[in-house]
Image (cartoon, rainbow, N blue to C red):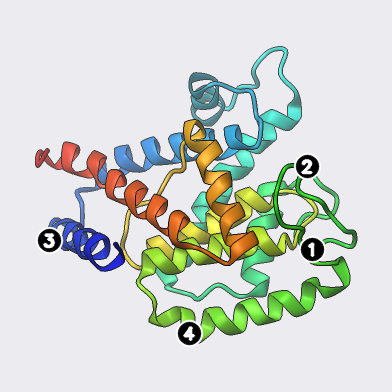
């Protein structure tokens, strides 16, 4: 599956590259749409009850939604800030490192978790998952190994495969007490952005198979199903570009 799927994605990316740089107003409307949808879906996967429209009101008008928890409001604002930071990192084409990952986590969990930006000091169990994240004493060592792999071998992989594995491994290690899903989806998108692919949004409707695929990676070290899911989502993420460029 891999090579065919990756060849298709590379061809789509080449087509998009021919139309770059995008006109500023085109870029702005694409970005606004992506920030909204990405923030909504990433938070909804974690149980944030705000609708897409409510999320839009928070992002565009800065209003709080009556009767909703401040926490849910902060999750929206924080996530949008984290995307801005991500774009910055992608522009500088920096490889992710420990402080970069902790910064992302800090932005996402600011005001929501007093351990924002630091690795967990406790053990966690992921409800319903077939694998248990490592003991908290081993988190540093696991993360060290993760970054060694990432700086080395991972750089040989197709960006979409690398992005999927980065995400899966971070979820498996679960380095933070809370906010691992959001932080690892951001790290995944940093890889895609750095390589010039559009932002991939994992829709809340696909949550079940998404969790099953991540669990398969954690339990059986089989990343195939998640790589495949991400490849399909990346393929779909080109559509708004074609539409706005009049190529649809």
User: Cβ–Cβ below 8 Å for labels 2 and 3?
Assistant: no
The crowding category of the residue bearing disc 2, from other C-alpha atoms within 10 Å (few below 14, some 14 to 19, many at least 20), is: some
Q: Is residue 198 above or below residue 43?
A: below
Lower sequence index among marks 4 and 1: 1
Q: Is residue 161 above or below residue 216?
A: below
Q: Which residue is mark 1?
A: 118
Q: Position of residue 51 (x, y in %)?
A: 54, 21
The crowding category of the residue bearing disc 1, from other C-alpha atoms within 10 Å (few below 14, some 14 to 19, many at least 20), is: some
Could you say which disc has been placed on residue 18 in the image?
Answer: 3
Whole-number angstrom distance, CA of label 4 to CA of label 3: 30 Å
Residue at screen point 78% across, 43% down: 111
Regarding mark 2 in the picture, which secondary structure is present there? loop
Regarding mark 1 in the picture, which secondary structure is present there? loop
**In the picture provided, is 206 more to the left or to the right than 171?**
left
Q: Quadrant of the N terminus?
A: bottom left
User: Cβ–Cβ below 8 Å for labels 2 and 4?
Assistant: no
Q: Which residue is mark 2?
A: 112
The crowding category of the residue bearing disc 4, from other C-alpha atoms within 10 Å (few below 14, some 14 to 19, many at least 20), is: few
Q: Which residue is mark 4?
A: 153
Regarding mark 4 in the picture, which secondary structure is present there? helix
Lower sequence index among marks 1 and 3: 3
Residue at screen point 52% across, 31% down: 59
């Amino acid at each position: 599956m891999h090579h065919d799927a990756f060849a298709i994605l590379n061809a789509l990316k080449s087509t998009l590259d021919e139309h770059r740089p995008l006109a500023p107003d085109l870029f702005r409307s694409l970005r606004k749409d992506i920030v909204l949808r990405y923030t909504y879906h990433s938070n909804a996967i974690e149980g944030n009850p705000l609708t897409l429209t409510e999320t839009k009101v928070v992002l565009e008008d800065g209003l709080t939604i009556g009767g909703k928890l401040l926490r849910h409001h902060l999750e929206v604002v924080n996530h949008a800030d984290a995307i801005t930071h991500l774009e910055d990192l992608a522009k500088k084409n920096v490889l992710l490192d420990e402080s970069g990952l902790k910064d992302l986590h800090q932005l996402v969990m600011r005001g929501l978790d007093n351990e924002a930006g630091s690795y967990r000091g406790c053990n966690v169990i992921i409800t319903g998952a077939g694998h248990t994240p490592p003991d908290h004493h081993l988190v540093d060592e696991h993360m060290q190994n993760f970054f060694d792999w990432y700086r080395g071998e991972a750089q040989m992989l197709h960006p979409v495969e690398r992005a999927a594995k980065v995400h899966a491994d971070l979820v498996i290690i679960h380095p933070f007490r809370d906010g691992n899903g959001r932080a690892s989806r951001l790290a995944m998108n940093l890889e895609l952005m750095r390589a010039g692919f559009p932002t991939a949004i994992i829709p809340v409707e696909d949550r079940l198979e998404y969790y099953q695929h991540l669990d398969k990676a954690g339990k059986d070290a089989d990343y195939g199903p998640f790589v495949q899911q991400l490849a399909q989502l990346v393929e779909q993420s080109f559509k708004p570009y074609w539409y706005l460029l009049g190529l649809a």
